[in-house]
Image (tube, grey):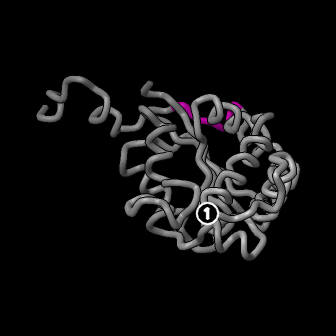
Amino acid sequence: MKTEQTFVIVKPDGVQRSLVGEIIGRFEKVGLKLVAMKMLVPTREQAEKHYTLDPEWLRKVGEKTIAGYEKKGLKAPSNDPLNIGKRVLGNLVEYFTSGPVVAFVLEGAHAVALVRKLVGSTEPLTSDVGTIRGDLVLDSYQLADTDGRAVRNVIHASGSVDEAKNEINLWFKQNEVLKYRHIQEMVIYETDLGHILG
């Protein structure tokens, strides 16, 4: 559990708004360890592969989008989840490849769940105050739909341990993810803190 890893990307809008340091700082302050990091401009192929690692992703995102329209009392542009999923994927790929991103791997107890909690919900407007999206972003699904684009939410974080493993393997070679001991791990994980006083 102490070495659970998760994958995070600061998206192009986060990089352009100079939020990389603040975002990484939030994770480090909670006790997570940075074990890999790179800056790049994703290709369309990388972006598509990232979003479709789960073969059911297109259908799931289409169903979620249709349900979101219905919840607001609006008519979805299509009743076909795959059609909607492809439209969402196209918008996400445009967004993801529009500039540099910073991809990194964090390690620590409950890394996946902890990062998801700190990031907030996908739509910034409905993210809680205190989360990265709730504090740093003002975008909404409504605004994004009106403009015909993906919601700009500055960050992606893996949704499960399996998803994290797949995403880490997609974006990093095995030798790019470092194994090292961080001094703060003694305070966070060791059961006896008697050594602090000597």
SS of the residue at dot 1?
loop
| Magenta stretch encompasses residue 172 | no
Judge left or right: residue 92 versus residue 115. right
- Which of the 4 quarters of the picture holds residue 172? top right
Q: Is residue 16 above or below residue 6?
A: below
Picture coordinates of residue 78, whole percent (x, y)? 83, 57
Q: Which residue is mark 1?
A: 72
Instruction: Identify the magenta region.
Output: 174-179
Q: Nearer the viewer, residue 27 or 71?
A: 71
**Disc 1 residue type (three-letter):** Lys
Query: What residue is rendered at 54% in x and 64% in y?
Result: 124
Q: Residue at x 54, y 31 (%)?
A: 179
Total residue callouts: 1
Tell me if 60 is positioned left or right of 25 in this view.
Answer: right
Q: Position of residue 195 (x, y in %)?
A: 17, 29
Q: Residue at x 48, y 45 (%)?
A: 115
Q: On the rendered image, what quadrant is the N terminus found in?
A: top left
* Residue 49 position by quadrant: top right
Q: Residue furthest left?
A: 197
Q: Does residue 9 appear in the picture of this structure?
A: yes
In the image, residue 147 above or below residue 76 = below
- At label 1, counting other C-alpha atoms closer than 10 Å, the crowd grade (few under 14, some 14-19, many 20 or more) is few
The vertical placement of 77 against 29, above or below, is below
